[in-house]
Image (cartoon, rainbow, N blue to C red):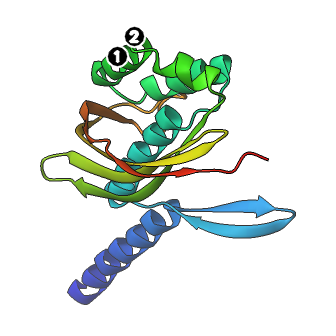
Amino acid sequence: MIISFCTNIAVLIYSNSIVQDSRKSIYIIDNGVPILAKQTDETLNRPVEYRGQVQLFHSLFFTLPPDDRYIKSNVEKSLYLIDDSGKKEYSNLREKGFYNQLISSNSILSIQTDSIKINTEDQSFIYYGKQLINRINSLTIRNIETSGNFIDMPRTINNPHGVLLTNWRIIDNSEISKRTRNAF
C-alpha cells in the first residue's frame, strides 16, 4: 500500500510538471504548418530589450532627413522612450537652430551604432556611434557618445520594450573627419 501511494504521488508530480511545460508551449500556424513556440522568462530577454531601446531611441532622435514633418514625427516618437532629459536636448537643438539649418542646407543626418554597453546592476548604458552629416558638398563624420540610465515600466504601443531612458546626456560629439565633394 505504501509503494502504491508513493507511486501515485510520483506520477502526480511528474504529470503536473509535464502540464506546466506544455502550458509554456504554443503552436503558431504559418500557411497551414504548425510551428512550436516556447514561452521564455522575461528576465532572460531584458538586457536585449534594454539594448534595443537605446538603439531605437538614438535611431529616431539622430536619423533626420531635411523634412520638417518627418523630423517632428521622429523626435516625437523618440520622446516616448525617454524622460525630460531628451526633451531638454531637443529644445536646446531647436533653439540653436539646428533643425532649421539641417532643412535649409538640405542635409541628411544619420547614425551608425558602434556598440552599446549595458550595465544591468546599476541600470545604466553608454552608447558609442558615428553621426554622419551628408551635405551637398561635404560629408562630416562625428563621434557620438551618450550615457544614461533606464528603468522598467509597463509596455505601451509607443514604448514596446517597456523601458524608459533617464538622465540621458551627450558625452562626446566631436568631429572625426570632414570630406568635401567635387561639385559637377
Instruction: Give the vertical position of 63 relative to 33 (above or below).
Output: above
Q: Residues within 10 Å of mark 2 (few under 14, many from 20)?
A: few
94 horizontally vs 147: left or right: right
Find the residue positioned furthest to the left. Answer: 122
- Residue at 54 percent of width and 21 percent of height: 101
Residue type, numbered disc 1? Asn
- Label 1, label 2: how many angstroms apart (C-alpha)? 5 Å
Reading the image, the residue beneath label 2 is 95
Q: Quadrant of residue 44?
A: bottom left
Q: Residue 92: which disc?
A: 1
Q: Residues within 10 Å of mark 1 (few under 14, many from 20)?
A: few
Residue 76 shows in the view:
no
29 horizontally vs 38: left or right: right
Residue type, numbered disc 2? Glu
Which element carries disc 2, helix, strand or loop?
helix
- Residue at 40 percent of width and 20 percent of height: 93
In the rendered image, residue 47, in percent from the top left (x then y), is placed at 32, 56
Which element carries disc 1, helix, strand or loop?
helix
Instruction: Give the vertical position of 90 relative to 123 (above or below).
Output: above
Q: Quadrant of residue 150?
A: top left
In the rendered image, residue 149, in percent from the top left (x then y), is placed at 22, 39
Q: Nearer the viewer, residue 8 or 168?
A: 168
Whether pointer 1 and pointer 2 mark residues with C-beta atoms closer than 8 Å, the reply is: yes
